[in-house]
Amino acid sequence: MSASDSSPTSPSTIARQLLHHAWPVLVAQILSMSMMIADTVIVGRYSTVDLAAIAVGSGVYISIVMLVVGVLQAVAPTVAHHFGAGRTDRIGPALQQGFWLALMLAVPGIVLMVFPGFLLELSSVPADVEAKTREYLLATAAGLPAVLLYRTFYAFNNAVGKPRVLMAISFITTATHAPLAWALVYGHLWLPPLGVLGCGISTAIVNWLAFTCGATYLARNPGYRPYRLFSHWRGPQAGEILGLLRLGVPMGLSTFIEVSSFTLIALFAARLGAESVAGHRVVANIAALIYMLPLAMSIAVLVLVGQAAGARDWARARMTIRVGMIVTAGLASLIGIALWLAREPVIALFSEDVAVRAVGLMLLIFVCLYQLFDSVQTVAAHALRGYKVTFVPMLMHAVCFWGVGLAGGYWASFHAPWRTAGPHVAGFWEAGVMSTTIAAVLFGWLLRVVMRRQDDPPA
């Protein structure tokens, strides 16, 4: 191997660093997603109405959680910049303020989940589905503070390059959730069958389990001692929390916009019947699972770009983005091809209902089509966060995913001329492909502008 091959900015070195950071995150994310998939499989074989309820309920739950967790993602670039610049003394205080912010944000999140009436009214959810949806949201609200505290810990560990513990905790929570949810749904713990409510209770329990594991690890691992995380503990500091909010609110809104553009489809499509919503839920789960690969790579890109930016090593930041983009796009495209080839047995895993399977097979082609563009825009968006550029990307997300994706999808599903014979949920997925394509172009352009400014700083 030549000297250039092993230099800090060589493509091979950067690729190894990215993959070394991304694979534990990918495993952790897949395990977390597998809990949602387990809910779909367990409830899907219990009843179609309960499956529709968890489709609507989890859509609301994920949208709220991703909005608030997105704000807390500000901890990652903040800590990564301190880490890259060698400001060890500022890492502990940043995490402490992240924990305080998590507790503050839990309050409005719980309120939205306990009182979801206005969200459910938007979708004209059938009465039987609405009742079960409310039960599910009430149960999961009990675990929201734990989710936010754990995700703050999650962002911190990624920023300092210690993602493997996240994988271990995900193993623990997944191994707990699947049997617990099954027992609660079908009534195997000296309780009556709870249906979708059982999944909500199990989700809340394992969220607290994850936070307990993370807090214990944080307190006892000697590797964190240089950061003095628990010494000189301070209460909420307005200036530091406002700094996190300035960086995190656009990130949270971007995450919420992108995620909700797909999860809220279940609300708008509820009027099409339980089979359509359930079929959408199945395909949405598959899409979310595949998304874990570009997301894991993008988190690795964010961290390495943030550390390089903190050290003002702009050449390393550029190479990280270039390598991350190529590797992620290639892997995502291969997964899309493999999914299309195995589409029928994959869909069959999720439901025994013939009508639900038919809807799922029709929608799966769209998931395969947008993999390349979605991976590009995801890496670009996270690279911008590594540079602490978040406001303009938020506006782009709104235009692409709410404007083109959600609003355009509503029109394509219910009002497009080719749907005169009857509305269909496929319109949302058609618009989704278009929105990710436009987003890939816009984010690629903005990222190029930001990198050029770093190459030619103002005099």
Image (cartoon, rainbow, N blue to C red):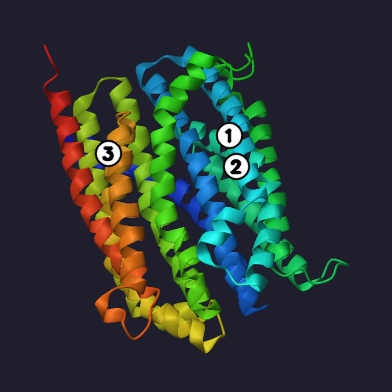
Q: Amino acid at mark 2?
A: Gly
| Residue with the most extreme bottom position | 354
Q: CA distance from mark 1 to mark 2?
A: 7 Å
Classify residue 450 as left or right of residue 258.
left
Identify the residue at horizontal 47%, vertical 59% (top origin): 263
Residue 55 image point, x, y percent: 55, 66
Residue 138 visible in the picture = yes
Quick check: 224 above or below 28? above
Q: Going from the N terminus, do you reach mark 1 or mark 3 first?
A: 3
Residue 369 lies in quadrant: bottom left
Q: In the current view of this chain or complex, which residue is farthest to the right? A: 190
Q: Is residue 184 above or below residue 16?
A: below
Q: Nearer the viewer, residue 42 or 281?
A: 281
- Residue 305: image quadrant is top left
Q: Read off the residue under disc 2.
A: 109
The answer to whether one can see residue 7 in this image is no
Residue 352: quarter of image? bottom right
Dot 3 amino acid type: Ile
**Distance Cα–Cα, label 3 vs label 2:** 38 Å
User: As drawn, is 355 to the left or to the right of 2?
Assistant: right
192 left or right of 289?
right
Point out the frontmost of discs 3 and 2.
Answer: 2
Do the numbered discs 1 and 3 sit on residues whose CB atoms are within 8 Å?
A: no
Label at residue 105: 1
Badge 1 vs badge 2, beta-carbon distance below 8 Å:
yes
Counting from the top left corner in percent of width and height, residue 87 is at 42, 14
User: Mark 3 highlights which residue?
Assistant: 14
SS for tag 1?
helix
Query: What amino acid is labelled 1 in the image?
Result: Leu
Classify mark 3: helix, strand or loop.
helix
SS assignment at label 2 = helix
Residue 156 in the figure: left or right of residue 211: left
